[in-house]
Amino acid sequence: MNVLHGYLRSLRAMAQVGHPIISESVILPLTRDLYLDSLADLEVYLFGVRCPLAVAQERERARRDRQQGVPIELDVPEFDLAHSHGPYDAEVDTSMMSVAQCVSTLTSALERPPSAFLRLRAERVASDDARPCLFCEVVAGTRAAHVVLETPATTAFMDQLRQPPDPAHVLVIPKAHVENIYAVGPALGAELFEAHALVARAVKRAFAPDGITTWSSNERGANQEIPHFHLHVYPRRVGIPYPPLLAKPETPVADDALRLSAERLRRAIDELRD
């Protein structure tokens, strides 16, 4: 995934200085969002180049430029998955069309505005709008979470997906659905920061880390992963690198580890409040 991040950054950099780019890429459901975010605000055409697997196998067997041709003998489910995102701006099938026909089809499409990538963006926005807010479910008690602190307007709970060796990464959120920092008013901001600071002191007391990193990410451009404002409290150890971006599919942290850490943090908060 990190290699793909670097590859897409390179494509974007070249496009931003005026270079037309042709990239051979496969957009799978796992990597769709990365493409949409990395290539945002660029004019992007999606072209589908198909070749049935049986034809590709026969072509490989007939090759003489490497090891007498290397046959593709596996049943590859990704063949259909690679085309699962829907219509392209143009599509060709190299088993039925000549090179000249393929080129003509693709160049004709370039005379029209691109639509396929824009459709993918619109579908994602619609999907995000329809999806229940995970953090609102935590506040409502319909989603399990290890809560360490509640105040009238805030809740703090263990992050289920990204924990350091000291499993004490806590998220502090407003109970009301506030999408990002731009909608945080003075009263809510004061209560959020007070809760945030109390959790940080509790992490320091319970786990004695070398330091604590706190942050919030706002909007997709800053890699905000959940559209409900949240502040992170993350314990650090010298020599242990900062956590990378989440890579889907996500693996939840073991529940027992979160439960034990939450108990330690609740005890520390009680001691600090005494």
Image (cartoon, rainbow, N blue to C red):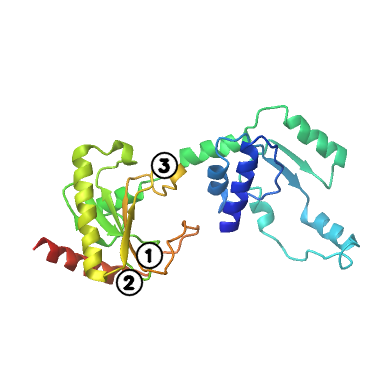
Disc 1 marks a residue whose amino acid type is Gln
Marks 1 and 3, the one that precedes in the sequence: 1
Residue 115 lies, in percent from the top left, at 62, 32
Label 2 crowd bin: few (<14), some (14–19), many (20+), radius 10 Å: few
Give me the C-alpha separation between circle 2 and circle 3. 30 Å
- Does 108 sit left or right of 194 as displayed? right
Disc 2 marks a residue whose amino acid type is Ala
Residue 230 lies, in percent from the top left, at 32, 49
- Which sits in the foreground, 29 or 161? 161
Give me the C-alpha separation between circle 1 and circle 3. 22 Å
Q: Is residue 62 visible?
A: yes
Circles 1, 2 touching at the beta carbon (< 8 Å): yes
Q: Name the residue under label 1.
A: 163
Marks 2 and 3, the one that precedes in the sequence: 3
Q: Name the residue under label 3.
A: 219
Q: Mark 2 points at which residue?
A: 257
Residue 259 lies, in percent from the top left, at 28, 69
- Does 56 sit left or right of 15 as displayed? right
* Residue 85 against residue 73 in the figure, above or below: above
Q: Residue 271: which quarter of the image? A: bottom left
User: In the image, which is nearer the foreground, mark 1 or mark 2?
Assistant: 1
Circles 2, 3 touching at the beta carbon (< 8 Å): no
* Residue 70 against residue 56 in the figure, above or below: below
Residue, x 73% and y 65% (percent of image)?
A: 74
Q: Can residue 1 be seen in this view?
A: no
Please identify the quadrant where the C terminus is shown.
bottom left
Please identify the quadrant where the N terminus is shown.
bottom right
Label 1 element class: loop
